[in-house]
Amino acid sequence: MAHRPTSRDVAQAAGVSQATVSLVLGDKWRGRVSERTAGLVRDTARELGYRPNLAARHLRLGRTRTALLVVPALTNEFFARVYTGAAGMAAEHGFGVVLYPSPEGVGPARDPFASARAALDGVIASSMAAQALGAIRGSDLPLVMLDSDPDDPVPAAWVNVDIADGMRQVAAHLLGLGHRRFVHLASAVPSWTFEVRARALREALRQVPGTSLRTVSAPLNADAAREAAERALTSPETSGGGPDATALVCDDDILAAGAYKAVRRLGRRVPDDVSVTGFDDLALATAVEPELTTVRLPAERVGEQGMAALLAVLDGRSFEAPDLPVSLIPRASTARAPR
């Protein structure tokens, strides 16, 4: 195996000390080394084919060029796409991304920071994984939050999508089809993003006289969603829901899949009797029949901007960006409200 040139080899060939080589190649020579000597060191390093040991250099500088991405579930396609975006942006800047999902697959991630903090330059985290961030708050690790409350004073930066507008688009679509009795099948995960969805839906429906809304919650799995939707569609409620509900608005596509099951088990049809909407536009949305009307979120862009925000913070720059736009994708799961 060919000998890989070291900084000592460069120093010997250039006739200078190793300290001088370190100063020049670390771009810290000005005021300490003459321009002629700096040029000689650079030329010698290039002729010898010297490449610095980046791992050792980053260790000396206190940088590992590693970011941690904390998400609630790797089994969720949305967060897999967020990781793809973050990892692509990181690779362009010589960074790596370590993924930390919930050990249970769905639900809040545990706190990984006690053992990992020393090996990281910063953290990017989803608001759905907020319970995993106890140790990072108050530490010196920069934190970038995704889909999170911009009034939270702890993070160094935020990257958000326009979740409220997505829910407003859902409401406008269903109201335009004549629906007035709604069930909101909400996520039981305590998170800012789901609070925003619920608030935006309530406010949008409140603007239209004669509408009613019943909210039921379920964990993010299809079976739990089916049970919650069945209860909502069969239990009489003066505030909405019950047998007369004609629209099921779901916080994500997985909950919508459970809603499909509930409608079928009750002997009804989507969308003839009950229209169903989702959120996220996962692959599942076009795998079910009828295909699901849902809100498309730019997951890869969320990951890209999350990593861009962290890079900016590490460079001492501020990062501010407008909320990423979302779009309603109408498909066959919604139709005019039945008479």
Image (cartoon, rainbow, N blue to C red):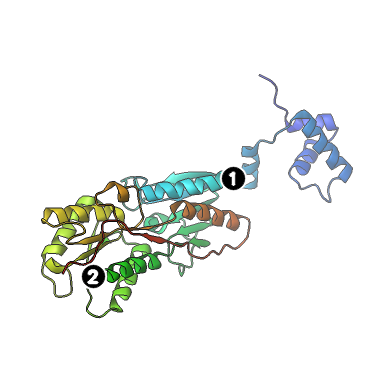
Is 204 above or below relative to 326? below
- Note whether residue 13 is visible: yes
Q: Position of residue 227 (x, y in %)?
A: 16, 56
Give the residue furthest to the bottom: 209
Name the residue beneath numbered marker 2.
179
Of badges 1 and 2, the one in the foreground is 2
Q: Position of residue 16 (x, y in %)?
A: 84, 35
Looking at numbered disc 2 in the image, what kind of residue is underneath it? His
Q: Position of residue 303 (x, y in %)?
A: 48, 52
Q: Secondary structure at mark 1?
A: helix
The quarter of the picture where the N terminus appears is top right
Name the residue beneath numbered marker 1.
92
Q: Tell me how far mark 1 sits from mark 2, CA to CA.
A: 48 Å
| Residue at position x 34%, y 53% in the image | 108
Looking at numbered disc 1 in the image, what kind of residue is underneath it? Glu
Q: Nearer the viewer, residue 308 or 115?
A: 308
Is 10 above or below relative to 285? above
Left or right, 166 with reference to 241 = right
| Residue at position x 52%, y 48% in the image | 67
Q: How many marks?
A: 2
Q: Quadrant of residue 140?
A: bottom right
Left or right, 74 with reference to 153 = left
Left or right, 64 with reference to 166 = right
Q: Nearer the viewer, residue 211 or 91?
A: 211
Q: Nearer the viewer, residue 40 or 282?
A: 282
Q: Quadrant of residue 225?
A: bottom left
Q: Secondary structure at mark 2?
A: loop
